[in-house]
Image (cartoon, rainbow, N blue to C red):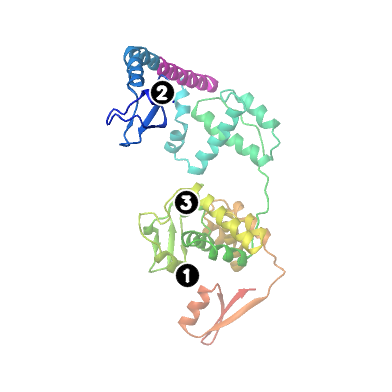
Amino acid sequence: MEILESLRCPRCGSTSLYRDGIRYSGQGEVQRFLCRACFYRFIPESSKRRITHYEGRECADLERDLENSLGAVKLLKQKNREMTIGHLGATKDSTAFMDFEEHLKAQGYSESTVKASHHYLNLFKRKGIDVTKPEEIKGFIAKQNWNNHSKASAVVFYGIFAKAMHISWDPPKYRYEQKIPFIPLEEEIDALISGSGAKMSTFLRLLKETGARCGEALRLTWKDFDLEKSTVSINLPEKGSFPRMLPISPTLKAMLNSMPRKSERIFSGCMDSYQSNFRRQRNKLATKLKNLRLKQISFHTFRHFYATMRFAETLNILIVQHDLGHKNINNTQIYTHLIDFRSEEYEVQVAETVEEARKLGEAGFEHYDTIGERHLYRKRK
């Protein structure tokens, strides 16, 4: 009260004042006041002099302290960078490691390979392993409770790094463990496609009808589709596969025509965003339909599904090899073990006109005989 009684409003001279909150200066807290007569807000002159005194007389000291603080931050960053480089090995190739991602891209490695390489290198770094010492890497991998597939992958991706850094690397031998892939029912695939958003459902429909890898589908441009002939050309295959041309259904053609053409690529965006979006929609649909099997479906599951169904229709492993783009038929033969040959029941249809034959072909029927002017089509039940 004594402070308020001794103060006057600098505008109207009134002594009727309110305390109007605390303001903060470099020296500390400063009380602001509000005049009840003219509603003028002000800080007492005594407080202003203290602030001016602090800002004037000690300004040089503040600037010097600020420079010292900034210098300390820069020095700390430099030391952290030197420690990181020293941990990785302060060699002439340390710069190459810092730009390892760019190096992999320049060498033509795919986005998935770049991502996997960094995953393992960061894992080694977190565990305190010196990545410039191959024997430490071997010992670390051997002690991990991983399956042989994961260990073999770690060896392969470290080999890529060792080659880039000119490190002598004698890789240990781990064999890939071949597993039978999960093949969902077609009803489950269709439920997943119909339950997704418009863009995602088109993407999944494309994977189902072509058996393309996720990365191959994301690379497709509008020029790769011939909507007149209802075909798609995979001109940028992954993993050294052959390019190929595959038919598409009228349903997929209509879905593609409804998509906006905002860029040259059909499906803009990166693989990580598509995968996270797919998992979110898939898990939501699995909960809604009370079918936890849907959670086992990934983008690559569509490729397994396509190969299995294609072999069931044709019983020709060479056709499946061509459609998948495999250079080695051994990679295709896994799907021959997924077909139950005991079931030889067929659904048979007869086509007498070109239009009827076209519809049956689109429905997955294959022509197997002709009697007079009637053409017989069948499809395995």
Quarter of the picture holding the N terminus: top left
Is 289 one of the magenta-colored residues?
Answer: no
Residue 158 visible in rendering: no
Out of 144 and 306, give the one closest to the viewer: 144
At a point 64% along the width and 40% down the height, the residue shown is 150
User: Could you say whether the residue bearing mark 3 is in a helix, strand or loop?
Assistant: loop
Q: Amino acid at mark 2?
A: Ile
**Which residue carries the number 2 mark?**
3
- Numbered range of the magenta stretch: 68-91
Q: Amino acid at mark 1?
A: Thr
Residue 32 relative to residue 139: left or right:
left
Q: Nearer the viewer, mark 2 or mark 3?
A: 2
Out of 28 and 81, give the one closest to the viewer: 28
**Which residue carries the number 3 mark?**
237
Quarter of the picture holding the C terminus: bottom right
Upstream in sequence: badge 1 or badge 2: 2
Q: Quadrant of residue 303?
A: bottom right
**Which label number is shown at residue 67?**
none
**Which residue carries the number 1 mark?**
251
Above or below, 269 against 120 in this view is: below
